[in-house]
Amino acid sequence: MKRPIYLDYNGTTPLDPEVIAAMRPFIETEFGNPSSGHLYGAQPRRAVETAREQVAALLNCHPSEIVFTSGGTESNNHAIKGLAYNAGNDRRHIVTSTVEHPAILEVCRFLERNGYTVTYVPVDEYGRVKVADVATAVRSDTFLITIMQANNEVGTLQPIPAIAEIARSNGIAFHTDAAQAVGKIETDVAKLGVSLLSVAGHKVYAPKGVGALYIKSGLELEPFCHGAGQERGRRAGTENVIEIVGLGKACEIAGRNLARDAVNMKALRDRLHAALFENLDEIRLNGHPEERLPNTLSVSFRGLEANRVLEEIGLDVAASAGAACHADAVEISHVLMAMGIEEEWAKGTLRFSTGRMTTADDIDRAAGAVIDAVRGLRR
């Protein structure tokens, strides 16, 4: 029996074959500790620094500005808490948006319980913040603005360079969660104007459990983890060499194929969009129609429940829901709620996300399965 067509690349990605090949020596033979002074530590140490250079090349920064982490969540925690703990008692205010990933929102809520204040800037019907709202939210005690580059649910891109200018002109650090953006669109930290940027390995065809944080030179953060002083004292603990190597290779591949992959993913996304909208009524697009990740398609089916649609297509298509439907309630995602989408639409929201391995045949088969399922449920 064929496995379902995978259209959940925003959830996680498979390992690229080149990534697996790069990691293999450090699984099989090069087991040394990078901090060891003897021969066994030499190759792992060089491999970690090569990976740092590969990540830096993709982000257009200096390798010394890259800190390896356990993933996007840790990178976000390190950026926000590390800066908060170094900001001083007279600067305890953060500006963020209502559509951030929980790895941002929950950190902000934690800090609120510990004496900090947070302004949650609203978004428009496309899930996009207004630059003027961010500017208005800034206060004399603001030490950080954190706005994601691309939304994980609907794909909407935020006006990062314009927000960065607000931060720069007010002497405020600016962090962006780029977990969904890396490998899909350009993530050049110089062009974006950010001082901190988070990367998640498993969104870019590297393993789960590894990530990176860009920290602009000169910016001081409290170390996320205290110990023996690895990562130039910014993140203690013996380096996860195997997965760091995988992340480095994945970033090298992403930089090499960025334009080609974006074109292919967008073409396949739009093929699915066209098939669904040509064959189904009472369907709507969520997210910005243009300023959106090239691989992301969030659609709502009026009057249906996402979980029921996923059950119907489960043997044919792997996608994700924008609402969790329970026996006594419908739990709609905070992103859809922030965008003001009515419940009769929001509860029937599915997210499809294409990737490098997606084919036109996959899209046609998936479209057929979704169309049949929706028609069947409506009957």
Image: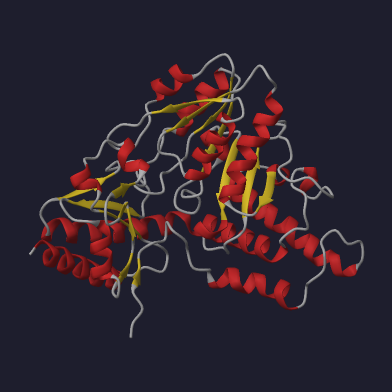
Outermost residue toward the right in this view: 38
Q: Quadrant of the C terminus?
A: bottom left
Report the side of 281 relative to 201 (left or right): left
Image position, residue 239 (x, y; %): 75, 58
> Which residue is depicted at the point 80% across and 44% down?
233
Outermost residue toward the left in this view: 379
Outermost residue toward the bottom in this view: 1
Q: How is the image coloured?
A: secondary structure
Q: Report which quarter residue 243 is drawn in.
A: bottom right
Disc tally is: 0
When the figure is inspected, residue 80 is found, relative to residue 314, above or below; the finding is above
Image position, residue 135 (x, y; %): 45, 19
Which residue occupies the foreground of this view, 193 or 349? 349
When the figure is inspected, residue 246 is found, relative to residue 135, above or below; the finding is below
Report the side of 164 relative to 124 (left or right): right
Report the side of 311 relative to 201 (left or right): left
Q: Report which quarter residue 219 is drawn in.
A: top right
Which residue occupies the foreground of this view, 218 or 70? 70
Outermost residue toward the front in this view: 328
Residue 197 appears in the figure: yes
> Which residue is depicted at the point 35% across and 64% down?
7
> Which residue is depicted at the point 36% across and 41% down?
334
